[in-house]
Image (tube, rainbow, N blue to C red):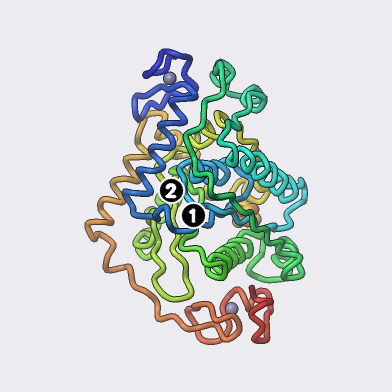
Amino acid sequence: MRCRKCERAAVINMRQHKLALCGEHYSEWFLAQTERAIEKYQMFTRDEPVLVAVSGGKDSLSLWDALLRLGYRADGLYIGLGINEPAPYSDVSLEKTRAFVSSVTPALARGASVASREVAKQSPNNELEAASSPPPLPAMRQDFVPTLHVIDIEHVYGKTIPQIAREKTRGHGKPCAACGLTKRYVMNRIALDKGYAVLATGHNLDDEVAVLLQNTLRWQTGYLARQAPVLPASREGLTRKVKPFCRFYERETATYALVRGIDYIYDECPHAVGNLTNFYKTLLNQLEAQSPGAKLGFYLEFLRARSEGAFEQFNQVEALHECEVCGQPTSAPGRCAFCRMWDIQKVDRAVAR
Ligand code: Q46
Ligand code: ZN
Ligand code: ZN
């Protein structure tokens, strides 16, 4: 397969776009599409500081990389969950994130390429090995050096996610509910406290469509009303949340990471194995194999219907209260779910934060 633009060996063939591209032209295309999504959905401007939630995985590291190359003022936030059984998932993901920062920081300073052929060679995708040279980077601003914020949950709150999950009913079975609540809280808190205009996450099209299918099968109209590339800061205490990669297939973000030489953690969190979202992803992949573009069509048509007001009546902002401990918005009076789960009692916002 040859690149549509230059006849070099293609690293990816996107059937839904009928487009095959080499590493250099794919990087260009990927960055242009990212920029287009940011502008189309009015996510943020070049003057606004952006906080990227990074997990060490391909999506979040690619997102941070792409935003930096596009000239946005993007910092990273890594949340250490303490998930190291049965495999050292958290330790390895922090290592990968730190390695990314140290590889990209000097590159940003000198405007050089960080693409690594070594990583491309390790790729299971043989086409990538055919890429003859690492693609050059687009011009990037020289006046910004990104910061990585690391919040270690055990260090700040006294327990790892698996430990708190074992203690609380919320964590029965898998720790995902406790983990999700904690991550959402900490991301919002740090974004607000450190003055970021917006919080960006690396959710890709496969993630979004799996959630969409899940919510549609159950006609969760409230969730459908709130599923969007941009979640505005609907009230004080909540930050704007955006998903610049929501139109990229998972294999597209993986290919960008490989082409750019980003070394990410390949393994999923051990608790993600066998979850419902992965089951829906498998179903949707079967659909996509029969009908290329089906996932993208499902998502974009949903966004169109949503923008035409199909779910407007279900988009009710709950009457929110202020948590009596940390001050964060909460649906019921008293302590918020986070402060209750972590048993934060007193008005000590330094601890809650
Ligand atoms: S990190 Fe946390 Fe996920 Fe692992 S424990 Fe579940 S929610 S699966 S995105
Ligand atoms: Zn090309
Ligand atoms: Zn609280």
Categorize mark 2 by other alpha carbons within 10 Å: few (<14), some (14-19), many (20+): many
211 or 329: nearer the viewer: 329
Q: Which mark is residue 252?
A: none
Circles 2 and 1: CB atoms closer than 8 Å: yes
Q: Is mark 2 within 8 Å of ligand 1?
A: no
Count every numbered label the image shows and give the total.
2
Disc 1 under 8 Å from ligand 1? The reply is no
The answer to which of 344 and 40 lies nearer the viewer is 40
Place of residue 137 in the rendered image (x, y in percent of width and height, measured from the top left): 51, 32
Q: Who's the residue at 65% across and 36% down the image?
A: 263
Ligand 2 quadrant? top left
Quarter of the image that includes the C terminus: bottom right
Q: Hey, what amino acid is under mark 2?
A: Pro
- Res. 123 in view: no
CA gap, disc 2 and disc 1: 7 Å
Residue identified by numbered label 1: 200
**Residue at left offset 43%, top offset 48%:** 244
- The three-letter amino acid code for the residue at tag 1 is Ala
Q: Which mark is residue 244?
A: 2
Label 1, residues with CA under 10 Å away: few <14, some 14-19, many ≥20: many
Residue drawn at x 47%, y 36% is: 139
Q: Is residue 139 left or right of residue 295?
A: right
Return the x and y of residue 45 as percentages of the image width and height: 39, 54
SS at mark 2 in the image: loop
In which quadrant of the rendered view does residue 228 lie?
bottom left
Q: Residue at left 61%, top 37%?
A: 107
Q: Tag 1's secondary structure?
A: strand
Image coordinates for residue 28, horizontal then vertical, percent: 43, 31
